[in-house]
Amino acid sequence: IIHAVNVLSSEEINRKFFSEEFEKIIYAVNVRSSEEINRKFFSEEFEKIIHAVNVRNDEIIHSIQALSSSHQRELLQHTDHQHDVMAFLMGASVPGESHIQVATEYPVAVYSDDHKFPRGTMADNTRHPRFIASCEHIYGRKISHMDLGCAGGGLVWDFLINGHISIGLEGSDFSLLERRAEWRTIPDYLFTADITKPFSASRNGAPLQFDVITAWEVLEHIPEDKIDGLFANIATHLAPGGMFVCSVALFEDKDPVTGAVWHVTLQPPEWWKKRLAAHGLVSVPTPFQHRDYVRGSHNLRAMDWDAETSPEMGFHLVVKHAGE
């Protein structure tokens, strides 16, 4: 970027910026000759030069912004790892064996482009300690948590390292087979399952329900004819007094080269609320601040959008059992 700024292109500089014509324009500015300024500054040639410089500046700014976001994510990842080490040195621990089982006849969502053309599950491992702290404040006790569409399992790790029960379910087996991200560190807490098909979670044979069930950037990936199956699973596994918390995107996400379509259901909040209500799940006022949300909150640990500044991109829902 710096090289491009400095040279722009040595040929362009030699041809445009140091041409006899441009020197005349600079001279006109220096002597403040209004007649020269009017005649030269608004000439077609100079407008082309200005346009070329503006376009290049925009390209450079966008590149710098992207680089800055990438560096911020890397810095946060290193900081998180340092905090993890400190927590372990001070006595924190993650149980090696969870004694949790997830039973399903459909371990992979074979129909999904997220499995056939893995991208999120191949790259994402979003962490967000702030969300765990907010849940702790709301409940004031240890929490049981299930993350649907967990990708690398980063959020499950955040709950576990803070002493809570947490498991993650992922519809693709990519991270499992590659042993990427937290699938290497907490394999007993991460499972593959098609979350639109019946599954059951248990611990030592006893059925498990969860205080908090999350789905970040997941609902829009589910085909409309499979959404009822997902919501039935959530209703079954959500503990009394528990919350289902999610982000829902409203923008298209597809690859014209491969034909993959990752965002297959783009619907407004009221549509989702109606589908949830059919399973006894109702939207409630959020107890969270905007930045508490794991996704759709401009989370710097992820390539994230922001529902607050760009509401056209998506929204959040907090849902409980009806009557609670």
Image (cartoon, rainbow, N blue to C red):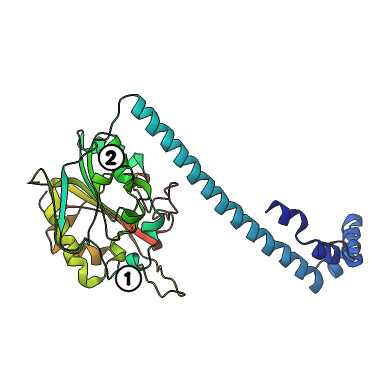
Tell me if I can see residue 43 in this picture: no
Q: Relative to residue 297, is residue 195 depicted above or below?
A: below
What residue do we see at 31% from left, 65% from top? 221
Residue 214 position in % (x across, y down): 26, 51
Q: Position of residue 253 (x, y in %)?
A: 40, 67
Q: Quadrant of residue 172?
A: bottom left
Q: Nearest the camera: 27 or 5?
A: 5
**Which type of secondary structure does the marked residue at label 1 adopt?**
loop
Q: Are there few (<14), some (14-19), or many (20+) residues within 10 Å of tag 2? A: many
Q: Label 1 sits on what residue type? A: Val
**Disc sitting over residue 134 in the figure:** none
Is residue 301 something that shows in the picture? yes
Tell me the amino acid under the disc marked 2. Answer: Phe
Q: Is residue 228 left or right of residue 151?
A: left
Which label is found at residue 159?
2
- Horizontal side, residue 178 vs residue 42: left or right: left
Query: Residue under circle 1?
Result: 264
The foreground one among 221 and 138 is 221
- The picture quadrant where one finds residue 136 is top left
In the image, what residue occupies the spot 45% across and 54% down?
303
The percent position of residue 182, horizontal first and vertical second, equals: 34, 46
